Image (spheres, rainbow, N blue to C red):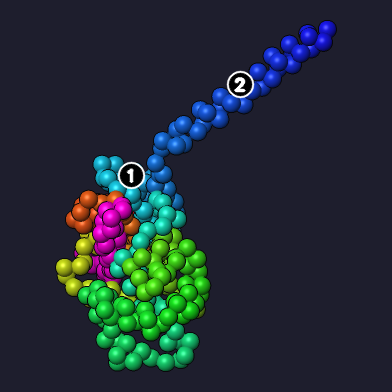
Amino acid sequence: MNSGISRRARVLAAAVGTGVLVPLVAAATPAAAAPPAVTCTSAKAGLAAKLQKDITAALATRKGTVAVGLHDRSTNTTCTLRATSAYDSASVVKVTVLAALLWDAKKSNRYLTERENTLAKAMITKSDNAATSTLWKQLGMTKIKGFLTAAGMTQTKPGANGYWGLTQITVTDEQKLLKLLTGKNAVLSDNARAYAIKLMGQVVSSQRWGTPYGVPSGVTVAVKNGWLQRSTNGWRVHSVGAFKGGGHDYVMTVLTHGNSTMDYGIATIQAVAKVIHKDLAAS
């Protein structure tokens, strides 16, 4: 009788074991193989599905690791891909440096000095590294981290030992920053926001690639790009932009690494930007 119970127990245990194990194995395999998907939501009928399909198609043949963020205030449309993945910032961190400078000046109830204006303009419009290093050092880690806290940019980790280009950034935080620059808020004054967007609108022509690609006529463009080659993950190539006009008011971030060349990364970003501008313009 005891052996009979033991046999039933063994059969039952095997059955339970099989029932538990098989679904776990089956579920784990596709999850590991499938890359993250573009997700979109929108108050405009059909727009989310269109953007999701077109961004996915734009990236289908591209190598490297790409993160995307889009928010359009006019249609309450948001798209994300790898929103919390960390990337070396390269020069897109310069927008954060400018915002931190403006935030700190506001706290002291002062305007930027002529020297600060000159440095800020060189940093944003020409991506001047020396100007950036000067402002980064002037602000110091306490003020930079203070701004990040005020801005709610909790995923951004400033680069150590003066290496601002190795600041860790995410799509989520870059989108937060762009929204701060383009909408009324308590962190940055209206004058400061207008100043930052003005400088991003004056970027030299050779650096106006990336998110502005395919922008419809009549839409204003503010952009900052970054590019950096390292021994791991090849080229980092990034672009952040703010766009207004044609019934839309939107911000876009595309971060990439694992690119074989800088031009390859630019082409990937522009493939995404082109379909976003097109789909929003048609909506």
As helix, strand or loop, the secondary structure at mark 1 comes to helix
Q: Quadrant of residue 201?
A: bottom left
Amino acid type of the residue that numbered disc 2 sits on in the rendered structure: Thr
* Residue 114 at x, y percent in the picture: 30, 92
Which residue is most to the left? Answer: 206
Judging depth in this view, the residue of 251 and 142 nearest the camera is 142
- Tell me the quarter of the picture where residue 190 sits: bottom left
For the residue marked with disc 1, what is the amino acid?
Thr
Q: For residue 36, say whether it is visible.
A: yes
Q: In x, y percent, where is residue 122?
A: 24, 80
- For the point 47% across and 67% down, which residue is it? 153
Q: Main secondary structure of the magenta part?
A: strand
Q: Is residue 56 magenta?
A: no
Residue 189 appears in the picture as rendered? no
Seen in the image, is 55 located left or right of residue 107?
Answer: left
Residue 14 lies, in percent from the top left, at 65, 18
The residue under label 1 is 56
Q: In the image, what residue occupies the spot 36% across and 54% down?
A: 68
Label placed on residue 18: 2
How many badges with numbers are in the image? 2
Give above or below for 32 relative to 150. Answer: above
Q: Is residue 225 magenta?
A: yes
- In front here: 230 or 177? 230
